[in-house]
Every structure is written in structure tokens, then in C-alpha cells.
Amino acid sequence: MPQPPAGRGWLARWWRWSLALVVLLALAVFGYVILHRGEASAPRYRTAEVSRGNLVVRVTATGNLQPTNQVDVGSELSGTMEAVFVDVNDKVRRGQILAQLDMSRLQDQLANARGALAAAQAQVKLAAATVKETRLQYDRLSRLFTSSGGQHPARADVDAAEASLQRAQASHANALAAVLQAQAALSSAQTNLAKASIRSPINGVVLTRTIEPGQTVAASLQAPVLFSLAEDLSKMELQVDVDEADVGLVRDGQRATFTVDAYPAREYPARVRRVGFGSQTKDGVVSYLTVLTVDNVDMSLRPGMTATASIVVSDQQNVLLVPSAALRFTPEASTTPAARTSGNLVSRLIPHRPSPTAARPPTEAAGARRVWILRDGRPVAVPVTIGASDGKMSEVTGGDLKAGMKVIIASLGASP
């Protein structure tokens, strides 16, 4: 049997070994890429340091400044305004005359009431004289009737005299009642005459004036408002609307500050005096009226000014603080240690059906919170208990976090 040339056999073997070497190199490169792809595309994170500090939580609300006691002064009487004695911004005293109605008709009514009282008093005297006369006549007839043994005068005359006495007494009582009525009418006329002079019920300042001399005041249905008075502008109140989401944090006695547009660079101190229980709805937003006391010694604040108040609802000193963004961060399921377990080359090359729980974050107890820290380049959950928060920073009241530790607040994507 003829043998192949030695040179041709060596060449064939060389090609087989060369092909096998190329295949092995290709498999090695492919395996290296597969094994290190996860490390090359490992996600990057932005972290922040856990620190200790002070945490002040504030609730913001807007409202208007109002006097502590504002009184609307009107008129119970109708008539023509004869004179007005005060103007806006004037200081007034209790009992001071602010304006005066025309009193001619009222004075006539007073004179008429006095005359009616005098007439009633005269009727009382007349009725008293009649009572005296009929009583004497009745006494005389009674004595004669008794002394004559009932013979003279007739019994009917004695009875008629007794009835006349009773009628006279009734007329006297009626006259006395008429005097009381006349006195009441006189008192009413005097009261109306006094009400024609519009007086200040408080010591304060005139805020508004809606009447001028010569105008007619019609008080048939309700008393028209002629003046608005503020009792003491050095003590005012700020009425703000606190949102329903924040009203649970606001309490009586909490301190606050506020600003007004007239002095944007100045902060005024205030204190919560009352949080209303009654709600009010405006444009679908539910809020609760909250009243703050304000000192206005320098009289720089004025009623009606719009103010923005900042109420301090919590002031924590030297507490452990964590960025609130760390509480909202949750890593993707593929970056957690359970999803990054290593395997052999074959297991990585063979596709697997995804686990139904691979994309689910770890479960946590009801009400618990957690943050994530980096450990060996991988995010690890740390359970914590959270207290007060101002939106940017949150107080940590329990858990394994320590000051100086770094927590993950955001993912920056995979590294190139």
C-alpha cells in the first residue's frame, strides 16, 4: 500500500493543530468577555454622608393681618346725617361722638312724650280725687244705714255708692298705668334722641368711613355700617389657612415668623394662638383657619396686609440626619446581591427563564423604612426608624446607621 508523502502529512497535522488553537483562543476570549461583562457594566451610585445636626421642621401658610378687635359702628335710626366729626386714621375714645343725625323730628317726639306723661300724671290726680269723693259718700251712707237699722237710706243706694267707689279705684289704677306707659314712651324718645349721636364703643382708630354730611341713613331692615374701628393696632392677629396635610403638626403656642410684601427683608415674630376645628374649602383645597398673635408696637403693620407665615412645628437638636432622597431610593433587582450570584461559564452561556421574584425588592415590615449603603461595591439595605422630616433631611431615631456612613441617594447608571 503506497504511503503519503511525509511533507503532506505534517502539513495536515499542522492545520488541525492550528485550527484547534484558534478555536480555543476564541472560546477563551468569549468566556472572558462573558465573565467580566457584569463587572465592566457595574452600576455607579451617588452617595451622601449621614451626619448629626439640628433639624427644624416648618409649616408654611398664607393669610391676612387683622385687628384683635374690630367693631363696625352703624345707626339704628333713619334720617339725614347732619354732621360727621371724625375721619379715617383718627384716634377716638370710648363714648366720643363720631357723627350726628338731624334731631328735629326726634326732639318733637321727645316733647310729645313729655306732654303725654304730664297728661297722664294729671289723670292720676283726677282719679285720686274721684276715689276720695266716692269713698266719703260710701262711708256716709254706710253709717246712716247702720244707725237706722237698715231703714234709711235704701240698701240699693248703699250698693250703688260701693260700686262707684270700686269704679273710681279702677280708674285710678288705670291712670297710674297710663303714667307708666307715658314714662316708657318718654324714655324711648330720650333713647332715640341719644342714638342720633353716633358714639364710639371702644378706644381705637377709625379704619373706614362710609358716610358724609347730608346723606340719608336708611335703617329699616338692618343697621348700615358707617364706621369701622380697630381697638388697638399695637396688638394684631394673623389669620392663615393651614393645609389639611399639615394641620396635624400645628399646635397652640408654637412660635412662628412671617413676612409681608411691604417689608420683604424683615421677619416678624408671632405665636400660634388658636387652630380652628372647622374646615373651609376653596378651589377644592381643604384648609383650617389658624390665628397667630402679632406685636405691632412700631405700627408698621396694617390690617389687611397679606403675610406668609412659617410655623416651627418641630425643633430637634443634635440628631442623626439622613437625606430624604435616600429613603426614596430603591436599587434595581439586577444590582442586588441575590441577582449577582456567580456561576460557571456554561451556566452563563445557557439562557434561563427569569425567576418570578428576581425583580421584586426585599420585603419589609409594615411601617418600617430602609436606606441602602454600599458594601463590597453592592447596595445593601439597612432598616431604620424615621422621625421628623423637613423634606430634604430626615431624623433617624432607630436602626444601625451611624454618623459618617454613606447612603445611596441616586443611581448614575452603568460604568463604561
Image: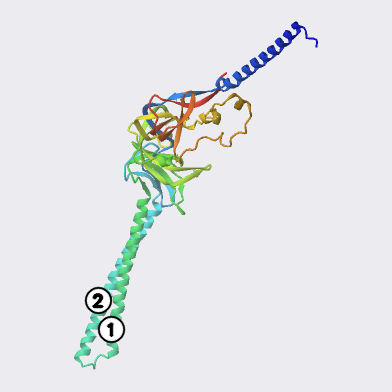
Which element carries disc 2, helix, strand or loop? helix
Identify the secondary structure beneath mark 1.
helix
Asked whether 89 or 416 is in front, the reply is: 416
Amino acid type at image mark 2 = Lys
> Disc 2 or 1, which lies upstream in sequence?
2
Residue 132's mark?
2
Residue 211 in view (yes/no): no
Identify the disc placed on residue 105: none
Q: Which residue is drawn at 52% across and 25% down?
A: 411
Residue 60, percent across and down? 43, 35
- Foreground residue, 69 or 281? 281
In the image, is 335 to the left or to the right of 72?
right
Task: Identify the image quadrant of residue 240.
Answer: top left
Measuring from the top left, give residue 13's x and y in whole percent: 71, 11
Quarter of the image for the N terminus: give it. Answer: top right
Measuring from the top left, give residue 28's x and y in whole percent. 62, 17
**CA neighbours of label 1 inside 10 A, class few (<14), some (14 to 19), many (20+):** many
Residue 164 lies, with reference to residue 196, above or below; the image says below
Circle on res. 161: 1
> Residue extending furthest left?
147
Q: Residue furthest top?
A: 7
